[in-house]
Image (spheres, rainbow, N blue to C red):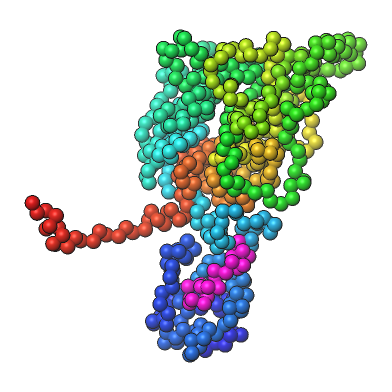
Amino acid sequence: MLSAMEFSAGQLVGLARTPMSGTPDHQSLPGVGGEEAWVQSRHWWVSGPSGQNVTMDEGGVPLLPDSLVYQIFLSLGPADVLAAGLVCRQWQAVSRDEFLWREQFYRYYQVARDVPRHPAATSWYEEFRRLYDMVPCVEVQTLKEHTDQVLHLSFSHSGYQFASCSKDCTVKIWSNDLTISLLHSADMRPYNWSYTQFSQFNQDDSLLLASGVFLGPHNSSSGEIAVISLETSLISGNLHRIGDITSCSVLWLNNAFQDVESENVNVVKRLFKIQNLNASTIRTVMVADCSRFDSPDLLLDAGDQAGLPCRVFDLGGDTEEEATDSGLHTSGSGHVKEGLRRVFDSVLDGHGQLSDCALETKVAELLAKGHTKPPECSDADTRNKYLIFTTGCLTYSPHQIGIKQILPHQMTTAGPVLGEGRGSDAFFDALDHVIDVHGHIIGMGLSPDNRYLYVNSRAWPPGSVVADPMQPPPIAEEIDLLVFDLKTMREVKRALRAHRAYTPNDECFFIFLDVSRDFVASGAEDRHGYIWDRHYNICLAKLRHEDVVNSVAFSPQEQELLLTASDDATIKAWRSPRIVRVLQAPRPRPRPRPFFSWFASHRR
């Protein structure tokens, strides 16, 4: 018999992995089997000669004190700790020690020690198990019905169906059962579409809105993204050119249903008119519902945030002097005329070496000073909605996120049709907030409670200056996943990293990301999808494809199911190891009914 001092970590693991021979002295441990199956599917028992239990002496007293077993367990990996915990009741109790699993957690996942445990977690053991066993990283099905690149995926709110858009110019609707099947396919080529690129279900899942690229006469193409966001309404946009690199974007609120009553009541109303400078445009419009900010806060600020650059600019709280300098609020026409006179005099005198683009932008900024409506003030307790979109001010590359508050009286098509509520001098609407990411934005997504905005961005080189709006700075291959709190309007997490992209500025495309209660997922150009934990900021899984991954989507009812769409023309379904085990577990055969019961049920 081994003495207590003769046990080492290696011997302990070896003993724990010795197959059971003979009959153990202990009954089967409660919970062993199903509960430990997430790491080890086989049961082990420590056995000595002739089936003697070597963890106890002849009197049934443990050979090793708990403190020594604990120290040995600290040197083991998670799987070995769980395997050793199946040996006897003493080892099982030590293997569930909270301090032991706290050490296992920080060591295995390489999380910074100052990051606290998830606020909803009940124990370190369960938290380790959540990240190990409940992440959708097991491929369970590959859908090959599309014949070209799959660009976008969207779930219905119920989670029973999802839609996909593709370069093959179809919109497909799928049934989300244990085995996914195709329900319907709509070919948009008869309507002169080039391809479909985005879709979204309305609030009660009775309608699906799809957008794409329309192929017009003389091979001209146009596209428009419309998003169902405000119950029975949708938001659309138009782009109007003012100069070579200056334009304005008009955003419209539309009724989703426009029947015969539209002859008598308004079905469309202009929401905002935003000036675009330096070839920038408004893209990727979404709506955040502020009334949902009171949901449980599962994302805690962790680590030192002092080093984060200030990216969010509050444009609604400037003083009058600051507003005049920034050109974001209305000012007197005298100031505008004086500014224009100075610019032209400087150019004519040869003192100002301005290019045509720079001169156009300077004049547009000065003209907008006297014709921009400042943000409307709202009651602090009012739960409004935020209109969120990508934009810019230096180049055509989208490098800023514009945030415009939608007040309650603006959420209906009743009232002025074309924004007559705007004063005669107010031609444009000012934004409430601007987030400058100093890079090319290639994706955005909201958390389920709409409080946190996740942004995929490819950074510009530090200190880079945009001299020509048509030649933005080079962008990094590494993608930064930034996190902003829409309640406090500040960046709250350091960038998540792992995924990469390779296309240059002029070929860069949108990569859709998605956020669930605990996870955030994104596609990438490196042929993988990625999953991170929202709280710990760690990458948990890489999901393999044969080409660029364009879109990812969590089931809204089950975050242990994730879909990925790729340029390899496939959609892959991924489930967590826990769900896979449940689905693969043999179902118990129904017990035969007793004869007398069967007989009694058929008597008349």
Nearer to me, 112 or 503: 112
- Seen in the image, is 546 located left or right of residue 362? left
Q: Residue 372 location in percent, x, y?
A: 72, 17
Q: Residue 62 location in percent, x, y?
A: 53, 84
Nearer to me, 416 or 239: 416
Q: Residue at x 46, y 43 (%)?
A: 557
Residue 149 appears in the picture as rendered: no
- Seen in the image, is 539 located left or right of residue 308? left
Please give the range of residues in magenta.
84-105
Q: Is residue 97 magenta?
A: yes
Q: Residue at x 68, y 39 (%)?
A: 488
- Seen in the image, is 97 located left or right of residue 207? right
Q: Residue furthest left?
A: 604
Q: Residue at x 47, y 79 (%)?
A: 46
Q: Residue 204 location in percent, x, y?
A: 43, 32
The part of the image, by quadrant, that contains residue 474 is top right
Nearer to me, 150 or 163: 163
Q: Residue 584 location in percent, x, y?
A: 37, 56
Magenta stretch prevailing secondary structure: helix
Q: Is residue 253 magenta?
A: no
Quick check: 464 above or below 372?
Answer: below
Quick check: 241 above or below 134?
Answer: above
Q: Residue at x 73, y 31 (%)?
A: 314
Nearer to me, 112 or 291: 291
